[in-house]
Image: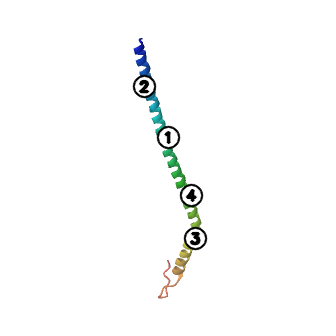
Amino acid sequence: MTDEELKQLVESNARAIQAMLDARAEERQESQQRMDGLQDVLVRLTDLQAGMAQMLASLDEDRPTILRKSTSIENKVDQLLEQPSKDGESEGY
């Protein structure tokens, strides 16, 4: 192999190595962008989960109030059904 051929081979290898390094740097940057995106998704999911937990806690807090109101309505309906009709007869529901 002549000096010129050796020089061309070395330059060719140097270009190939540089191209591989550039490609690797680009892949690393893309990977970091994907990781950043996944981190953002994880933060949003965590916030969503916290919001759902607050909503469920709120529902649990409201349950006794809803039950109390429902029971009150049921009692009033029962009272209305037990009252005699205007003409003096019970309708017997």
Q: Position of residue 17 (x, y in %)?
A: 45, 26
For marks 1 and 4, give the CA distance: 31 Å
With respect to residue 42, does 70 lie above or below?
below
Crowd tier of the residue under label 4, counting other residues whose Cα lies within 10 Å: few below 14, some 14–19, many 20 or above = few
Earlier in the chain: of badge 3 and badge 2, it is 2
Which residue is disc 1 drawn over? 32
- Between residue 38 and residue 8, name the one nearer to us: 8
Whether residues under marks 4 and 2 lie with C-beta atoms below 8 angstroms apart, the answer is no
Secondary structure state at the residue bearing disc 3: helix
| Amino acid identity at mark 3 | Thr
Mark found first going from the N terminus, 3 or 1: 1
Numbered disc in front, either 3 or 2? 2
Q: Residue 65 has which mark? A: 3
C-alpha distance separating marks 3 and 1: 50 Å
Looking at the picture, how far across and down is residue 67, in whole percent? Answer: 57, 70
- Locate residue 64, reporting x and y percent: 59, 68
